Every structure is written in C-alpha cells, then in structure tokens.
Image (spheres, grey):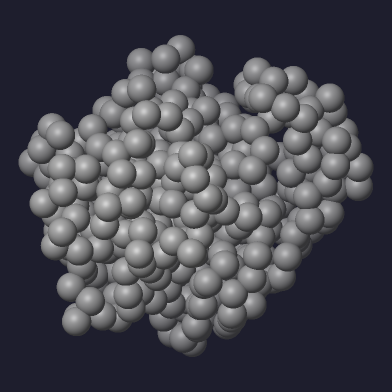
Amino acid sequence: MRSSILSASAVVLLSGLASAQTFTECDPTKKECPADPAIGGRQVTDFTAGKSDFWTLAEGTTVTYDNSLGAKFVINKATDAPTISNVGFIMFGSIEVWARASPGNGIVSSFILESDDLDEIDWEWLGYNNTVVENNFFGKGNTTTYNRAEYPSVATPIDTFHNYTIDWTSKSTIWYIDGQAVRTLAYDDPLTIGGTNYPQTPMQVKMGSWVGCASKEAETNPASQGTCEWAGGSADFTKAPFTMYVKNVTIQDYGCATEYSYGDKTGSYQSIKSTGGCSKDGKPNSPSSSSSSSSSSSKSSASASSGSSSHRHQRNLGIWNSHWNCKCNNPFHRCQSHRHPIRLRNIYQFVNRGSSYYIGRKLYQETQARIWHA
C-alpha cells in the first residue's frame, strides 16, 4: 500500500518525520530521570461530557467540546498544532480511541504513545486521503531505517468515527480498526532488530493535529518536497478550519503501580520498576519519591483546561532540532524546543536527532522562521 501512496524519496523523509513526533526532556538511558506517574488501572475519558483532568494541553492549544462530537482540535493557520497529553503513563496496555480525522491537504491528525527514551507507537491520518490510516513504531528514537509504517484501509476516516485500538504487551503490539486486527508486530520481528527497537518502556498517550505542508514554497523546496508529497501537498487555509474530533479514549494500564522508573540505562522492559498499587479510578498519583538508580524525583501532573497550559513535555514543543531553540505549539513532533510532532509546527519541528533531520532545520530557516521563530 505504501508504494502506491508515496514515492521512495517521500518514504525516507516521511518516516523520519513521523519518528520526530517524539521528544524527551530526560532520557533515562542516558542519565537519571524522574519516575513516571502511572495510570495504574483503567481510565476512561468521555470528551462529549467536556474537558477532563486526565489530560493537559500543550502550550498554545485550545480545545473545545461538543456534546455529540467530543473534543475538537482545530487548525486555522500554519502555526496551529492543537495537542493534548495524558497525565499518566502505562507499562504495557490497551488504548482505544474513537476519532474522526481532520480533512485537508497538508493536514495530519495524530494519536501516539511515547516514552522518555523515545520508544513510540503511532496512528496518523493524512487529511487528503479518506481511505487509509498510517500505523508506525520506533524504538529508542532509532531512525536509521524507514520501512516500518503500514497503511491499512479504513472506510472514510475523515467523514466517519472509527475505533482505533492498540494492544501493547511485551510479546507483541497489535493495531485494530473497529475491532479487526490490521497489524501485529512481534517483539522479535525482523523490523525490531532482535527486540532492540521494540517499544517496551513506560508510555504516555498524546494526540492532536498539525500542519505537514504549510505553503506552496514548501512543495518545491528540496528539503520539504518529500514531506509535502506525503501530506498531500500544501494546506489551503482559505478552506480552514480543519478539525479533528475525538469522542472518547479508554486506556487500560496493564501495570499495577503508582509510578514507573528505570532500573538501569538499558531501556529494556525487564529493567522497569513499578512502585505502589493499582488505581481504582485511572487517575495517577504524584510519585512519592525516587525509586531507582535512574529515577531521583517525581514528575508532577497538571490539570487540563480549555486554554493553553504547560505540561512536562511542553518545555520545548515545536520544531525538532536540538541545535536550536524553537517555539511552536505542537507536542507531536520531536523538537527539543517545542518538540514533538507539533509542528512545522509542522513537520519541521520534529527534527531533533541528528543529521537526518537537518533538512528540516534548513527548511524551517528558509521558509518558516519568520512565522514562528521569536
């Protein structure tokens, strides 16, 4: 399916950008980091009932709520990238979302799991394609290969709500659409390189939408052509607003803990330590204290609001390059400054690991700096 959607050059660039949807302010495989607050049970969010304290908003994000359509993630301009993050983490689990993707060439809707050491599991929808959804995964931020994404068919994901589920265990990860398995990734699948690149550390759920191709100039710039092709060309903001809807999210943490911490710097699931007991309401408690050699302080959680707020990964949401400080509002793309696929706000905000993403920085400097860079 991928070959019918993307050119070879687009596949390479795009896969890298998708991975850039991750950002970490502290990588436990490199240094001691705070413990992660655990969901520790079953957590249900009904966005048709309004805002929820289970979620925090990325800087610059405004989410409104509809009693039938749920949370509305709206893009009106190139710098918009509404994104929310759960206040807790899971150590293996089941995550299901009822969502309707945003329409529009150049517009991307995302639902991801990511960890402090850059393990990642994704669902992404391209606003120009009303027939497929992308699933993908990354281990420890490894983007040396670009052959992990798959594009299963789904009926009108832009016009219709569907149930998208991820069942994640130490043995396999299974992606489901409306209860039907569309992909199974085994721990020892060749793509995981012997399990090394298999996602296996405590994950946080994030979701939102962002602009993958912001202008006609980006379509012809060698640094961004591949991304724009993947995103279906540049966004036409005269057709805004572009809205992604999420009715509800159900998260089951297979761990039973108050917090998760890294016992060493291997990033293996065997090294993860859990402290405390199960949660009855799915609301994480603030970790009581450090609980491992790699965990020395607790992480705090913030309440969600209908306006902008900060969260633990918000320090730098935005453009991805670790070589500069950027100020974007998209936590979906890796940006040491704004990080995480939020983006170029957009796609270029994801570049934060190595020379593979330098092209993103170049494009950002040449075509977008005047838009967001303060």
Tell me where residue 301 sits by quadrant: bottom right
Q: Position of residue 258 (x, y in %)?
A: 82, 46
| Residue 89 in sight | yes
Q: Going by the image, does 222 lie left or right of 165?
A: left
What residue is shown at x 33% (from left), y 52% (from top)? 364
Q: Tell which of 373 and 214 is nearer to you.
A: 373
Q: Going by the image, does 198 lie left or right of 191?
A: right
| Residue 155 in sight | no
What residue is shown at x 15% (from left), y 34% (from top)? 9
What residue is shown at x 62% (from left), y 38% (from top)? 116
Q: Position of residue 242 (x, y in %)?
A: 29, 75
Q: Position of residue 332 (x, y in %)?
A: 46, 53
Q: Residue furthest bottom?
A: 67
What residue is shown at x 49% (from left), y 87% (from top)? 67
Vertical placement of residue 14 versus 83, above or below? above
Mark count: 0
Q: Going by the image, does 157 lie left or right of 142?
A: left
